[in-house]
């Protein structure tokens, strides 16, 4: 059976929707569209907005978790603003397409159910707004007096500054020497950041929710044995690679599984509705889940070393949940004598990667049009990092 057979009679779509409904999932009517590679790329660029991802990184020693890339052997794209509209790559195998479709039904339910997504407004209005943004950006790039290079420079700076409660972007717009078109680009990034915040705040939960329901829905489908096993294998690659591996998907999936076992389906739906990643990990990542993740049922809670490891793991998980994964930068003002913009990294014991600090400052110089200096810590020593108009970087110890 070819991929297109799914869409000729809709049999798999109907089966998945029926199975999901049987379990109590509440989703918008799901639509799938097949695209070739070129079309898929266009949708990713103009609807998926892949550039609008968190810019910052903490130092390597702190970045111990990530959302796994290994499941991306299939290609799908869905918008959180309009989760019922999904795009699949025509070249996917049938098992890859089923894998994507089941996950997308779970994402659809998650977005409709979780309260934080109610803050982003109507999905169709958002898409129309995105389309207007794209048209404005395109007109600036085609303007001979501006050009694509200048547009990309301003957008890159705005993306680097955007997850700061919009303080940095507001300051640049109000106090900087930006032209009208540059300010409009910053406003666009500011608006689209509001759209991405719910995703950032629930990224871990959404992956766990999709993985949890994938197993249940798959077991309800009337699939040939070979196809079912291939779909299970894909799931296992993400969530059961080995007892030594740890991914956020695996952790969230196991949390939902234990919650259902302990409290039942009513509670799991309520948790999905009210929680976000930080509260989800804080409340439900307990000793039992740690033992399951370690694959060691004989671990003793009174063992000091293991208890310390559990507490440290939970602390590290919370550090990458929601907006906590992004360092906070505040504006401390402008130096009167030379117009240098003064910034400060709000220290929370996690050191920043120096190369990201340097690149961030260069982006800020592009927006500010003058020197920019940030206060942070390297090796637990207060440092001042200055970037001048020529993009040269200088570091000195504070007070020296």
Image (cartoon, helix red, strand yellow):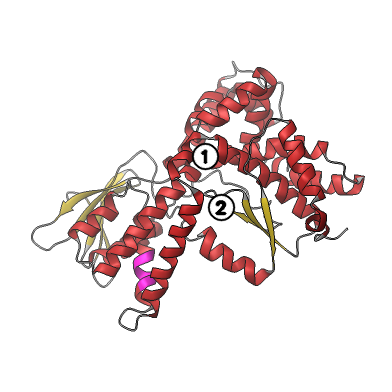
Label 1 neighbour load within 10 Å: few <14, some 14-19, many 20+: many
Name the spot of residue 16 as percent of width and height, x first.
76, 42
**Outermost residue toward the top?**
302
Work out whether residue 345 or residue 99 is closer to the camera in this orientation and state it: 99
**Where does the image place residue 267, in percent across and percent down from the top left?**
61, 22
Q: Is residue 18 visible?
A: yes
Please indicate whether residue 241 sits to the left or right of residue 358 in the image: right
Examine the rendered structure and indicate whether residue 130 appears above or below residue 289: below
Q: Quadrant of residue 213?
A: top right
**For the image shown, how many numbered marks are present on the structure?**
2
User: Which residue range is magenta in the image?
Assistant: 151-155
Please report whichever mark, 2 or 1, sits nearer to the chain's N-terminal start: 2
Residue 171, which numbered label? none
Horizontal and vertical percent position of residue 350: 39, 42
Image disc number at residue 79 = 2
Residue 134 versus residue 208 in the image, above or below: below
Q: Secondary structure at mark 2?
A: loop
Considering the image in quadrants, where does the N terminus appear?
Answer: bottom right
Question: According to the image, label 1 marks what residue?
Answer: 202
Residue at image position (47%, 43%) is 198
Q: Nearer the viewer, residue 82 or 9?
A: 9
Q: Position of residue 283 (x, y in %)?
A: 52, 24
Q: CA distance from mark 2 to mark 1?
A: 14 Å
| Residue 266 occupies quadrant | top right
Residue in front for this viewpoint, 127 or 292: 127
Q: Main secondary structure of the magenta part?
A: helix
| Residue 69 vertical position relative to residue 284 in the rendered view, above or below | below
In the rendered image, the vertical position of residue 44 relative to residue 138, given as above or below: above
Please tell me whether mark 1 sits on a helix, a strand or a loop: helix
- Left or right: where 5 falls relative to 362: right
């Amino acid at each position: 059976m070819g991929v297109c057979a799914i869409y000729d009679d809709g049999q798999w779509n109907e089966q998945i929707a029926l199975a999901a409904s049987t379990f109590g999932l509440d989703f918008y009517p799901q639509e799938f569209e097949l695209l070739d590679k070129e079309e898929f790329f266009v949708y990713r660029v103009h609807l998926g907005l892949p550039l609008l991802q968190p810019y910052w990184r903490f130092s390597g020693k702190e970045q111990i978790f990530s959302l796994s890339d290994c499941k991306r052997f299939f290609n799908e794209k869905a918008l959180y603003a309009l989760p019922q509209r999904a795009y699949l790559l025509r070249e996917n195998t049938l098992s890859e397409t089923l894998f994507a479709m089941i996950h997308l039904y779970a994402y659809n339910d998650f977005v409709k159910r979780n309260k934080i997504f109610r803050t982003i407004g109507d999905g169709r209005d958002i898409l129309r707004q995105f389309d207007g943004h794209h048209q404005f950006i395109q007109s600036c790039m085609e303007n001979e007096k501006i050009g694509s290079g200048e547009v990309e420079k301003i957008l890159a700076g705005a993306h680097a500054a955007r997850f700061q409660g919009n303080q940095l972007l507001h300051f640049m717009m109000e106090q900087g020497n930006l032209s009208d078109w540059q300010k409009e680009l910053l406003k666009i990034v500011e608006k689209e950041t509001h759209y991405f915040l719910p995703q950032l705040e629930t990224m871990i939960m959404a992956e766990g929710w999709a993985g949890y329901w994938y197993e249940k829905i798959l077991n309800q489908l009337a699939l040939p044995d070979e196809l079912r096993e291939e779909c299970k294998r894909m799931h296992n690659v993400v969530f059961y690679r080995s007892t030594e591996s740890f991914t956020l998907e695996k952790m969230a999936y196991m949390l939902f599984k234990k919650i259902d076992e302990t409290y039942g389906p009513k509670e799991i739906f309520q948790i999905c509705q009210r929680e976000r990643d930080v509260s989800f990990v804080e409340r439900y990542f307990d000793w039992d889940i740690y033992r399951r993740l370690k694959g060691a049922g004989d671990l003793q809670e009174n063992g000091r070393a293991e208890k310390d490891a559990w507490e440290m793991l939970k602390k590290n998980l919370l550090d990458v949940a929601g907006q906590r994964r992004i360092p906070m930068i505040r504006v401390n003002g402008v130096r009167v004598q030379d117009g240098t913009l003064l910034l400060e990294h709000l220290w929370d014991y996690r050191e920043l990667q120096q190369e990201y600090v340097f690149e961030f400052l260069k982006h800020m110089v592009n927006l500010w049009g003058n020197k920019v200096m940030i206060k942070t810590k390297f090796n637990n020593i207060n440092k001042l990092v200055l970037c001048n108009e020529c993009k040269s970087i200088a570091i000195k110890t504070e007070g020296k």
